[in-house]
Image (tube, helix red, strand yellow):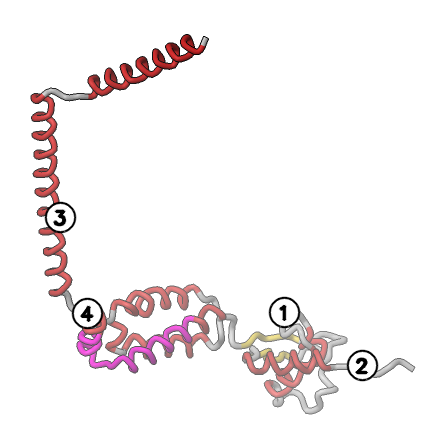
Amino acid sequence: MKQVKYLFVLFALLAFLSSGVFAQEEKEMTEEEWQNEINRLTQEKADLSKELESLQGSVNDLKSKINGMQAYDECMDEAYALVGASRADVDAFRKKVNDLQGKIQRKESPKEDRQAELDALKASKISALPEFYTTVHMRLQRLLDAWQEKPKEIMYTVVKGDYLWKIAKNPKHYGNGFAWPKIYKANRDQIKNPDLIYPDQVFKIPNLTEDEKAHYDKLRRNYKPAPSQ
């Protein structure tokens, strides 16, 4: 029995070694195949070396161009010098442009004052810089042209039952009764006593300035009616 096991193990070992030799023989290359593989790798190396040389040439060209380019800050300083301005001048001009744009977008009256500010910006040589030219000479002017400003004042004919507070509170006028002194001051030639006005009197109703609107709105917010008895 022991001899059978020994023969079995020996046979298995011989089979394993035979398969290994066979596999090794399968992987071995002929001299011609080796030479072909060496030729392929040699050509691949030559192609890669050529490509590397080409890339290195491109890198050198880019470095030369970068070295020849002027720094951004230097370019801007030269541009500012052409319009006779310093960086501080340009910064101040930029702030004026932004401030005016905000006023126009908010429609801060009077419109003619905004136009005067824009005309002053247009007259500055700094407005010729690419950063500002389109905004100052085109876009802001279009915004101003599209701004439909209310008349400086309208005329109102007093009817029976009117009083200054009621006229001021009219939504077509101020929408705020606390603004009645504006009407009174604008029509002092007709109003001797603010408590006495008469039908068929024609009053001027001038526009409120932004400061006046804020003032009368504050009065309305802070008003506390007297407690009822």
- The label nearer to you, 2 versus 1, is 2
The amino acid type, in three-letter code, at marker 2 is Pro
Q: Overall secondary structure of the magenta stretch?
A: helix
- Residue 111 point in image, percent of width and height: 44, 74
**Side of 84 where 57 appears, left or right:** left
User: Label 1 belongs to which residue?
Assistant: 172
Check disc 3 and report its element: helix, strand or loop: helix
> In the rendered image of this protein, does residue 30 appear above or below residue 45?
above
Is 30 left or right of 176, judged from the image as shown?
Answer: left
Report the quarter where the C terminus lies: bottom right
Task: In the displayed orientation, state which residue is furthest to the bottom.
Answer: 192
Few, some or many residues within 10 Å of mark 4 (<14, 14–19, 20+): few
- Magenta segment: 77-101
Q: Which numbered tag is attached to residue 225?
A: 2
Q: Is residue 214 magenta?
A: no
The three-letter amino acid code for the residue at tag 3 is: Leu
> In whole angstroms, how far apart are the C-alphas of marks 4 and 2?
68 Å
Q: Choose between 55 and 96: the one closer to the eye.
A: 55
Residue at horizontal 42 percent and vertical 79 percent from the top: 113
Cα–Cα span, label 2 and label 1: 25 Å
Give the answer, above or below, for where 72 lies relative to 223.
above
Give the quadrant of residue 68: bottom left
Q: Earlier in the sequence, mark 4 or mark 3?
A: 3
Q: Nearer the viewer, residue 98 or 74?
A: 74
Q: 10 Å neighbourhood of mark 3: few (<14), some, or many (≥20)?
A: few
Identify the residue position indicated by label 3 in the image.
55
Q: Position of residue 193 (x, y in %)?
A: 71, 90
Instruction: Say which residue label 4 marks.
Output: 71
What amino acid type is highlighted by mark number 4?
A: Ala
Q: Which is more foreground, mark 1 or mark 3? A: 3
